[in-house]
Image (spheres, rainbow, N blue to C red):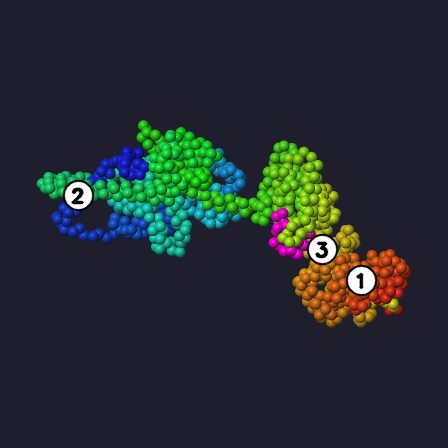
């Protein structure tokens, strides 16, 4: 029958590694040993008396797992496939689980005879469920809490106020109780964070949907590693909450009805677990073949590796249960108010020794055998000698098995004197990780090779271990190998029980995690630093700025933020290539960094934009000196291979707390100040002022209003006549857009066209202007003159965009039965100087459609006569700066004469802009200029008024 266990005495075999305890010294142990020794004799007697014993049919039983098939249940698979259940007369069916409580429900309902469960089985027992634990598989619980790793020290209290997935909200007896007890002990009650339903999906933590999640240390860390996710694990064991993990259990009814079957099932299961933990790779192949087809081999091997320190097959017999540990678990539950204090464990733990009362028949048989042996002394002596040899061989084999597991362990393991720190035993993997032989380590102390900065932390934890405040601890620290190489190791230290009159011992298990640490450092660096310049990126910049603001609040000092943009950097990229542009950015980053203190932060936000944080300022004088120093350094030539490049810097400056008290506003103000510096001519710095904010708000509101203007019919088209100078007739007109704002009135194109270009609205506006111009020119060609033309201005953005807009023009012109010569497109000289394939193709499209091209503002830019020959240009428009001061024998007259003669020689017609006086008209007509445009003839007027002007011309 099931009852609680007292702590058993222990037989210590000196041949086993580290003084391993083999079996409790109980009557059942000696009875079992006697049964094994005399089984051949009894079998011989039975065979001699009654012949062979007939084979019996296998008993069918069901084992219900709590999760899907994985290495967590490897021992049961091994017991099936190695035939241990079959040898015990059992046909075992293993069922996967869908949730953690399914085994309890099915065992209680009789759908399964056996199940696997966590320490919450104790809660089920107290709740009245007749569950009985047969044996402990996991000596330590794999349950822990995971959070995203930050650059600061690990801090569990970051969970306060955050979202966390800990157990299922509908599960009364889940593993959440273990973590909740841990959080309470750390001073974090359950109501201090938001607990949400567990999705068992690591992406929820990776993507920030939650900030903490409960995990199995045998499972989720592998998934985190594969995704490159930096994480921290918090274990309840760090505060002395040491629950058992997986347990094998049954019901009181099964024990009462089938005691022999229970014993057989338990023994075969434990044999299966011994085999599985000794043969991890073979067990993984077995799982992939029969249970988890198409599974993940790497993940199963990861599980097997992580389970070794939890199951501890080398140190503890699998299945062993310590009643004091269960009492500790009950006390934790009582502290949470989940069970009464000093709750009884009677009947909860299976009594492995109960077989002694059922072996009385064996003692009677032994007595009979003894009588028979007395009759045959020679036979007795011979059989006893043979059995002694077999028993000794079994002991040696057991010792060799455990020693092999110790020697072949993938973890470095050492037994260490807790007082002197001397090594008592060391396995090869431990020697390999530390790069020292057994002899060298035997002459050293445990922490001699540790990094000086880490030794204090380990000693502090050892002091707690010796004071019995904790039973184990885990740390990550650095160790020096014999060649001086520094390695990172994960250390797990567990106290070992020893006789009172001897030194305390502890078991140290280590794992080389150098590659993992280097990978974490690389991931962290890539996430926080610009890969080109190695400066902090936007993320690190914002972190440092937030920290500097806190420091400034405490010290009441000021902070300056410099927003730096490189002038003319695009030209370097376009002419010399992106590789040389990268070289320039690296050098620029170095020059900026050399201009500030080491305590200041220089970051690259992207492209050619840099930022600087100047902290702990007493005055702004140093800010101006640093800004000017950066400007001076940027003006110096950049050596790019065989070429030299020249750029400059425009810098915007904002101050904390003078200009703003939060990060977003500070960055916005610095950006506005930088654009003010660019607008003032570049190569300078500018402080943020409230006027800049007002201008920015005005631009933003005007841009928003402009979006409504396009759709709301607020745009109007004005026309200015272009007059034939010889006849005085109006043959052409230039279409000019106006915006009649509902509250601001008529808004100048000089104000809203730049906004339209920066916001992308220029394309919709340009299409509207074309459509309106085409409609009016169709009317005027039919009513006034068949060759009437309208000139339409195009923004450089419109002209350089390859979006098929001219195809839409042609479609509309076909719908209106309008010839291409009805329209003239006006472009500026700059577009031809920077002519690329797109510009050339656009000019060819216009030529193919019959649309003529006028070169506007001729003579004011970087004029080049070669493009007049290269491209198909129909009109030159002399800029008003030449006509404004036109007088006989003036330089402006000479230049105008030259332009007119040159244009006519090239077959181009000339339009003079800005004609305001009769003298200007006469001089231009005498020089042979074809057309004139200006206030002398008319200001730009609405379409209806222009139509009336044309009608008056016909009278």
The residue tagged 1 is 877
The reply to whether the C-beta atoms of the residues labelled 3 and 2 are less than 8 Å apart is: no
How far separated are the C-alphas under marks 2 and 1?
A: 121 Å
Residue drawn at point x = 44 percent, y = 38 percent: 479
Element at label 2: helix
Residue at x 46%, y 45% (from the top left corner): 515
Is residue 329 found left or right of 629 in the rendered image? Answer: left
* Sequence-first tag of 3 and 2: 2
The residue depicted at 25 percent of the width and 36 percent of the height is: 26
Q: Which residue is mark 3?
A: 756
Q: Tell me where residue 352 appears, x and y as whole percent.
A: 27, 40
Q: Is residue 525 above or below residue 571?
A: above
- One can see residue 458 in this view: yes
Q: Secondary structure at mark 1?
A: strand
What secondary structure prevails in the magenta region?
Answer: helix
Residue 17 lies, in percent from the top left, at 31, 39
Q: Residue furthest front?
A: 642
Mark 2 and mark 1 residues within 8 Å of each other at the beta carbon: no
C-alpha distance separating marks 3 and 1? 25 Å
Q: Is residue 242 visible?
A: no
Image position, residue 122 (x, y; %): 37, 39
Q: Work out how far the residue at label 3 is from the one at label 2, CA to CA, in angstroms.
A: 103 Å
Q: Residue furthest left?
A: 375
Sort mark 3 into few (<14), some (14-19) or many (20+) by Cα contacts within 10 Å.
many
To which residue does mark 2 refer?
Answer: 386
Looking at the image, how many numbered discs can be counted on the residues?
Answer: 3
The residue drawn where x is 27% and y is 51% is 83
Q: Answer with left or right where residue 153 lies relative to residue 916.
A: left
Residue stretch in magenta:
568-587
């Amino acid at each position: 029958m099931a009852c609680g266990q007292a702590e058993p005495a222990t037989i210590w075999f000196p041949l086993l590694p580290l003084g391993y305890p083999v079996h409790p010294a109980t009557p059942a142990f000696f009875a079992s040993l006697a049964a094994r020794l005399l089984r051949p004799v009894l079998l011989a007697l039975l065979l001699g008396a009654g012949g062979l014993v007939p084979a019996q049919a296998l008993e069918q039983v069901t084992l219900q797992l709590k999760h899907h098939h994985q290495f967590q249940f490897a021992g049961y698979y091994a017991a099936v496939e190695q035939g241990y259940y079959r040898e015990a007369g059992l046909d075992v069916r293993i069922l996967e689980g869908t949730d953690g409580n399914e085994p309890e429900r099915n065992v209680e309902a009789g759908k399964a005879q056996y199940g696997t469960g966590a320490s919450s089985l104790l809660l089920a027992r107290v709740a009245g469920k007749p569950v009985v634990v047969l044996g402990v598989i996991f000596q330590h619980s794999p349950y822990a809490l995971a959070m995203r790793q930050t650059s600061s020290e690990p801090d569990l209290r970051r969970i306060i106020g955050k979202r966390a997935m800990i157990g299922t909200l509908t599960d009364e007896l889940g593993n959440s109780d273990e973590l909740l007890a841990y959080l309470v002990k750390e001073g974090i009650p359950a109501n201090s964070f938001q607990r949400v339903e567990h999705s068992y999906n690591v992406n929820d933590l990776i993507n920030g949907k939650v900030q903490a999640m409960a995990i199995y240390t045998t499972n989720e860390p592998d998934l985190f590693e594969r995704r490159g996710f930096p994480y921290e694990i918090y274990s309840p064991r760090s505060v002395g909450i040491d629950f058992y993990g997986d347990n094998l259990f049954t019901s009181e009814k099964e024990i009462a009805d089938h005691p022999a079957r229970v014993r057989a099932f338990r023994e075969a299961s434990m044999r299966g677990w011994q085999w599985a933990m000794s043969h991890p790779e073979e067990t993984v192949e077995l799982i992939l073949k029969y249970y988890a087809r198409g599974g993940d081999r790497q993940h199963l091997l990861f599980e097997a590796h992580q389970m070794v320190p939890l199951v501890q097959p080398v140190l503890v017999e699998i299945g062993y249960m310590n009643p004091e540990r269960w009492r500790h678990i009950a006390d934790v539950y009582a502290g949470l108010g989940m069970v009464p204090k000093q709750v009884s464990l009677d009947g909860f733990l299976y009594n492995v020794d109960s077989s002694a009362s059922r072996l009385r028949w064996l003692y009677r048989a032994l007595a009979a055998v003894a009588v028979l042996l007395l009759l045959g002394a020679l036979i007795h002596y011979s059989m006893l000698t043979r059995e002694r040899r077999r028993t000794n061989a079994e002991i040696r084999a057991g010792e060799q098995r455990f020693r092999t597991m110790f020697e072949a362990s993938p973890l470095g393991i050492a037994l260490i004197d807790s007082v002197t720190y001397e090594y008592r035993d060391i396995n090869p993997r431990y020697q390999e990780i530390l790069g020292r032989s057994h002899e060298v380590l035997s002459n050293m102390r445990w922490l001699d090779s540790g990094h000086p900065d880490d030794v204090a932390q380990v000693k502090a934890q050892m002091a707690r271990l010796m004071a019995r405040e904790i039973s184990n601890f885990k740390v990550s620290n650095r160790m020096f190998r014999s060649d001086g190489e520094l390695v990172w190791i994960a250390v797990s230290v567990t106290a070992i029980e020893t006789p009172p009159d001897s030194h305390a011992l502890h078991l140290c298990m280590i794992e080389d995690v150098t590659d993992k640490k280097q990978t974490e450092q690389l991931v962290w660096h890539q996430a926080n630093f610009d890969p080109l310049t190695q400066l902090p990126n936007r993320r690190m910049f914002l972190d440092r700025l937030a920290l500097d603001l806190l420091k400034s609040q405490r010290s009441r000092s000021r902070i300056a933020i410099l927003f730096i943009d490189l002038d003319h950097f695009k030209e370097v990229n376009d002419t010399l290539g992106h590789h040389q542009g990268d070289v320039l950015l690296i050098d620029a980053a170095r020059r900026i960094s050399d201009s500030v203190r080491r305590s200041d932060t220089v970051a690259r936000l992207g492209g050619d934009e840099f930022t600087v944080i100047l902290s702990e300022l007493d005055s702004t004088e140093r800010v101006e000196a640093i800004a000017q120093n950066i400007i001076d350094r940027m003006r110096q030539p950049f050596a790019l291979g065989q070429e030299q490049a020249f750029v400059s810097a425009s810098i915007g400056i904002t101050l904390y707390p003078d200009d703003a008290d939060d990060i977003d506003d500070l960055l916005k103000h610095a950006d506005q100040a930088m654009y003010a510096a660019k607008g003032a001519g570049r190569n300078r710095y500018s402080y943020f002022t409230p006027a800049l904010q007002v201008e920015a708000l005005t631009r933003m509101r005007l841009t928003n209003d402009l979006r409504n203007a396009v759709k709301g019919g607020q745009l109007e088209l004005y026309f200015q006549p272009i007059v034939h100078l010889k006849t005085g007739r109006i043959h052409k007109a230039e279409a000019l857009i106006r915006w009649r704002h509902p509250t601001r009135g008529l808004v100048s194109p000089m104000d809203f066209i730049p906004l339209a270009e920066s916001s992308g609205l220029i394309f919709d506006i340009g299409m509207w202007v074309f459509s309106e111009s085409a409609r009016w020119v169709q009317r005027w060609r039919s009513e006034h003159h068949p060759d009437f033309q309208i000139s339409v201005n195009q923004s450089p953005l419109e002209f350089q965009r390859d979006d098929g807009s001219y195809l839409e023009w042609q479609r509309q012109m076909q719908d209106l039965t309008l010839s291409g010569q009805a329209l003239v497109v006006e472009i500026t000289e700059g577009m031809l100087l920077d002519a690329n394939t797109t510009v050339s193709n656009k000019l060819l499209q216009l030529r193919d459609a019959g649309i003529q091209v006028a070169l506007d503002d001729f003579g004011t830019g970087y004029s080049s006569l070669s493009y007049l020959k290269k491209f198909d240009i129909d009109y030159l428009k002399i800029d008003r700066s030449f006509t404004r001061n036109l007088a006989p024998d003036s330089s402006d007259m000479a230049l105008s004469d030259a332009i007119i003669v040159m244009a006519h020689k090239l077959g181009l017609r000339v339009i003079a802009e800005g004609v305001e006086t009769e003298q200007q008209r006469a001089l231009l007509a005498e020089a042979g200029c074809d057309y004139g445009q200006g206030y002398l003839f008319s200001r730009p007027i609405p379409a209806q008024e222009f139509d009336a002007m044309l009608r008056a011309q016909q009278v």
